[in-house]
Image: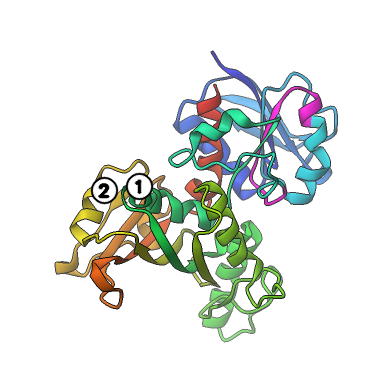
Amino acid sequence: MGCNLAIAGVTGAVGQEFLRLIEERNFEFDSLKMLASARSAGKKITFKGKEYTVEEMTNDSFKGVDIALFSAGGSQSKVFAQAVVDAGAVMIDNSSAFRMDPEVPLVVPEVNPETIKEHKGIIANPNCSTIIALVPVWPLHKANPVKRMIVSTYQAASGAGIAAMNELANQSRDILDDKEAKCEAFPYQIAFNLFCHNSPMMPNGYNEEEMKMVKETRKIFNSPEMAITCTCVRVPVMRAHSESINLEFTDPITPDQVRSLLSTAPGVTVLDDAENNRFPMPLDADGNNDVYVGRIRQDESIPDNRGINIWLCGDQIRKGAALNALQIAEKMV
């Protein structure tokens, strides 16, 4: 039994990933609407042997639709949310528009799938860095509650969309040809450089990306008092985010216990070969669904063996966006 599906923002990086994943995972649908902005309307996309015409998204686009996968930006999500709900469809939204709304479930299927059924027509997909962090941290937290979490992210150009990925490629070519690097998608040169994440700075000195990780983790874990701090950085990697995470647990825990817990955790691949200095790299995660975890070691600065460091890489466009949303849809149908 399939469903009537719509993809909003189908021509973008995440929209295209939706199509690849729907085919890969044999997600069954009875009908499919491909929606985008007016400038993409009329474009032809061949998918699973059938030619589709991209339609301009309007308030009437959702009649007869069961699930609308949204990756068209927060402003568009806000504009069309009521139309989706009024049509009796469910919006699975990839933007930040509704994540912190107490009426909207914020879901990572490996963590809190039970909240899906609480929806009132909208389900929010968390921030890409939050998803990639929580897939491996959750099974550890369940076994031994995390008291404090310190995250440093190394975020790829893919997090800012196709234009940013093209900018990294073009700047790299220009610099190697002794030409000036042009900055359009990013405020600063991304090739051969890194900088504080290009989200707005908040009054508390953190950027918006960092505060998203803090607030979303607390909501998903249902731990409003959990101590979390983040530093988010944009790095010259094409695709797949990396994160260094320091965890302080309630009770003692060893690296071997962490490896054992993660070896059976859904959506996690342990890649932790200290003997050969072989640990997760963005290239390992690129195009793959799992979050890769390694550098699992004791934090010797925390007493009683209650501290652990891990390093992880995850594909921002897949698990950090399209895959997580599609997994929610799979659980619904």
Identify the residue at the far bottom of this view: 178
Q: Determine contact: label 2, label 1, CB under 8 Å.
A: yes
Residue 161's x, y, as percent?
A: 63, 57
Residue 145's x, y, as percent?
A: 37, 54
Identify whether 293 is placed above or below 105: below
Point out the image quarter for the N terminus.
top right
Identify the residue at the far top of this view: 1
Identify whether 196 is placed above or below 36: below
Label 2: state its secondary structure.
helix
Residue 277's x, y, as percent?
A: 21, 70
Depth check, front residue: 92 or 169:
92
Depth check, front residue: 12 or 50:
12
Residue 135's x, y, as percent?
A: 42, 49
Tell how many labels: 2
Q: Residues within 10 Å of mark 2 (few under 14, many from 20)?
A: some
Magenta stretch: residue 98 in it? Answer: no
Residue 261, numbered label: 2
**Nearest to N terminus: mark 2 or mark 1:** 1
Tell me the quarter of the picture where residue 36 sits: top right
Q: Image point 56% across, 17% down: which residue?
A: 2
The amino acid marked with disc number 2 is Leu
Identify the residue at the far left of this view: 275
Q: Is residue 26 left or right of residue 253?
A: right
Residue identified by numbered label 1? 139
Q: Residues within 10 Å of mark 1 (few under 14, many from 20)?
A: some
Give the CA separation, mark 2 to mark 1: 7 Å
Residue 294, numbered label: none
Magenta stretch: residue 85 in it? Answer: yes
> Quick check: can you spot residue 154?
yes
Stretch of the chain drawn in magenta: 84-97
